[in-house]
Amino acid sequence: MRYLINMSYNGNSFYGYQIQNNNITVEGEIEKCLSKILNQNINTVGSSRTDRNVHAINQYCHFDYEKEIDTEKLKHSMNSMINDNIYIKSIKKVDDNFHARYSVIKKEYIYKINMGEYNPIEKDYVLQYNKKISENVLDEFIKLISGKHNFKSFTSDNNNKTYERDLIVDYKIKSDILYLRFYSSGFLRYMIRNIVGLLLDINDGKKSLSDINHIFKSEDRKECGRCASGSALYLNKIEY
């Protein structure tokens, strides 16, 4: 039988989602907790491999177990013993053909940028850029970066079969916080952080909007510019 876990976590406490030797990861903590409760080795499959410091409001993983589980009881047990930077929101039984990663239709990430006064309390959760980005720059940048493109210049990962992604980007500004929303069926490693870094470089005058087309065509990560901090990035939604 297959079970689906929905969780949230504070990414600043982990070396990313995917399990690693000798480093604390979200997947490692989930599997350790499940294995202890169910008294056997449990492997999980996550919906998205978030990087170090990246947070999740809604992350998912599935696991297989041969017996019927009281999912509410399991949720309570996990939350009582798991790392307190992880919260299990729900657990439910799903079809055996369901796959936490491959059944994903769309993913939504949010990146938060403080364009106002420096806030030390939020520095680990909102990028402290502390400069204005005009809506004219945002509108033009989003128009150029959105759509179906080869995003090879926006990742350091050279092992993908394809670098083409269909991306939707929009934004809102509230109390000097810029919320950038990225929506796609899939993302490349560091893709969003590199896109945000390019926006900041353009706003700082290090690059221009007219460079974007060249950056896409170059398929060269070095042409893109800075990589923005992971601690202001949130996995917000997964659609199945």
Image (cartoon, rainbow, N blue to C red):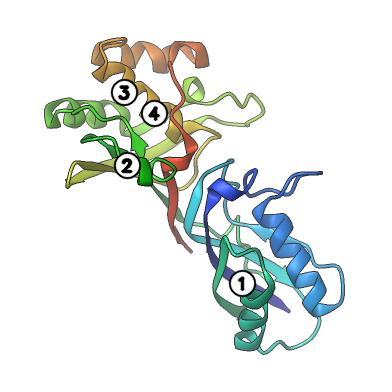
Q: Position of residue 37 (x, y in %)?
A: 78, 78
User: Which residue carries the number 4 mark?
Assistant: 195
CB under 8 Å between callouts 2 and 1?
no
Which-is-in-front pick, marks 2 and 1?
Answer: 1
Q: Position of residue 77 (x, y in %)?
A: 67, 81
| Mark earlier in primary sequence (4, 3) | 4
| Mark earlier in primary sequence (2, 4) | 2
Q: Secondary structure at mark 2?
A: strand
User: Which residue carries the number 1 mark?
Assistant: 4
Q: Position of residue 195 (x, y in %)?
A: 39, 28
Type of the residue with mark 4: Ile
| Mark earlier in primary sequence (4, 1) | 1
Q: Cα distance, mark 1 to mark 3?
A: 38 Å
Type of the residue with mark 2: Ile
Quadrant of the image occupied by residue 116: top left
Which-is-in-front pick, marks 1 and 3?
Answer: 3
User: Which residue carries the number 2 mark?
Assistant: 168
Residue drawn where x is 64% and y is 77% of the image: 80
Residue drawn where x is 52% and y is 29% of the image: 163
CB under 8 Å between callouts 2 and 4?
no
Residue drawn where x is 57% and y is 51% of the image: 48
Q: Is residue 217 left or right of residue 19?
A: left
Q: Cα distance, mark 2 to mark 1?
A: 27 Å
User: Which residue carries the number 3 mark?
Assistant: 200
Q: Cα distance, mark 4 to mark 1?
A: 31 Å
Q: Is residue 2 above or below residue 160?
A: below
